[in-house]
Image: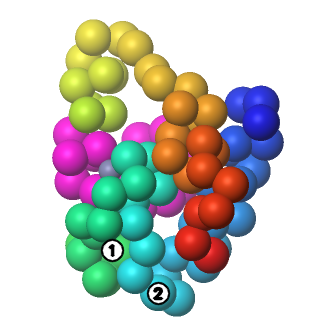
Amino acid sequence: MNEEEARAKILRFAKRQREHNFPCPRCGEWKMNEDPARNALSRRIDVYVCDACGLYEALEDAIGEKQPFTSWDIAKRENWPL
Ligand SMILES: [Zn+2]
């Protein structure tokens, strides 16, 4: 999966993120609040991530680095629970 495909997969997931409780699309951990809006909004793309990932992205911005979307758990796993 290339960067553009990973980005598209995340955006497809974002449309359904409110339907159920899902793991964090960035780290894959089941630690999202059931109400998506009570999680962190990613600084990279319009999707909610867990608080830890939200903090990680803020730290990345502080040092001027960004992980590619291909490194996100949702991009690496074929059996993402949708
Ligand atoms: Zn996370």
Residue 39 visible from this viewpoint: no
Task: Give the residue displayed 28% in from the left and 45% down from the top.
Answer: 54
Q: From the viewer's perspective, is residue 22 above or below residue 75?
A: below
Q: Nearer the viewer, mark 1 or mark 2?
A: 2
Task: Give the residue displayed 47% in from the left and 24% down from the top.
Answer: 67
Residue at the farthest bottom position: 19
Please state which of residues 80 and 37 is positioned toward the viewer in this rendering: 80
In the image, 65: left or right of 30? right
Q: Quadrant of residue 51?
A: bottom left
Instruction: Say whether residue 4 is magenta.
Output: no
Q: Label 1 sits on what residue type?
A: Ala
Q: From the viewer's perspective, is residue 59 above or below residue 36?
A: above
Q: Label 1, secondary structure: give it.
A: helix
Task: Give the residue displayed 43% in from the left and 74% down from the top.
Answer: 22
Q: Earlier in the sequence, mark 1 or mark 2?
A: 2
Q: What residue does disc 1 label?
A: 37
Q: Is mark 1 within 8 Å of ligand 1?
A: no
The picture places residue 77, in percent across and down from the top left corner, at 60, 50
In the image, 65: left or right of 71? left
Query: Gap between marks 1 and 2, in whole Å?
Result: 13 Å
Q: Say whether marks 1 and 2 touch (CB < 8 Å).
A: no
State the quadrant of the N terminus.
top right
The picture places residue 35, in percent across and down from the top left corner, at 31, 82
Q: How many marks?
A: 2
Span of residues in magenta: 42-55
State the quadrant of the C terminus.
bottom right
Q: Label 2, secondary structure: give it.
A: loop
Q: What residue does disc 2 label?
A: 20
